[in-house]
Amino acid sequence: MDAVTPKADQHSHLVRPSEMEWQKTRFPGCEMKTLLLDRKSGLVTALMRFAPGAVLPDHEHVNIEQTWVLEGSLVDKDGPAQGIECKAGEFIWREAGSRHAAWCPQGGLMLAIFQVPNKFFEADGRVRDSNGNDWAEAWGHTGKG
């Protein structure tokens, strides 16, 4: 079960990732456990697990994205920072509007924080979120992007 933002009358929210199932994404070799999802603002915190060679295709970070690599590495496959590699124990953040494809040559496990979900650019010109939904319909209400 994925975590969501609870009612406002609660202050501390314990999430037990070890009791959650990995959820497959539409990107082969990429799974995630959503630790926090605030649909109103778009804030997402997730554990992401990548099989060796898994790729996150062409996408834009709508706002600041932060990633702490726990195992393996995350490499910019293309884009302005092509070849930059964030290894286990390292932290990388990307500015709003940055666009690239990323991959995990040996696989990886990371904690990722998105102020609003990424825009993924499809070959047919559509812009989708990581679940395949039209980005503007799903996240346009956040006023970001």
Image: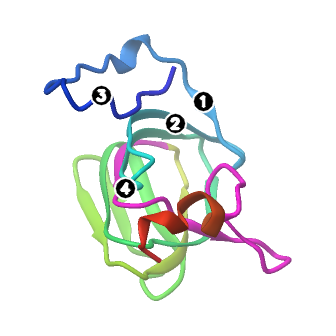
Are discs 4 and 2 less than 8 Å apart at CB? no
First to last magenta residue range: 108-134
- Which residue is at a point 42% across and 11% down the rendered structure image? 19
The x, y position of residue 28, in whole percent, is 72, 45
- Which residue is at a point 32% across and 16% down the rendered structure image? 16
Q: Is residue 50 above or below residue 65?
A: above
The x, y position of residue 132, in whole percent, is 72, 54
Q: Is residue 85 magenta?
A: no
- Cα–Cα span, label 4 and label 1: 22 Å
User: Sequence-wise, which precedes: disc 3 or disc 1?
Assistant: 3
Q: Is residue 115 magenta?
A: yes
Amino acid type, residue under disc 1 in the picture? Gln
**According to the image, label 2 marks what residue?**
32
Amino acid type, residue under disc 4 in the picture? Ser
User: Sequence-wise, which precedes: disc 4 or disc 1?
Assistant: 1
**According to the image, label 3 marks what residue?**
7
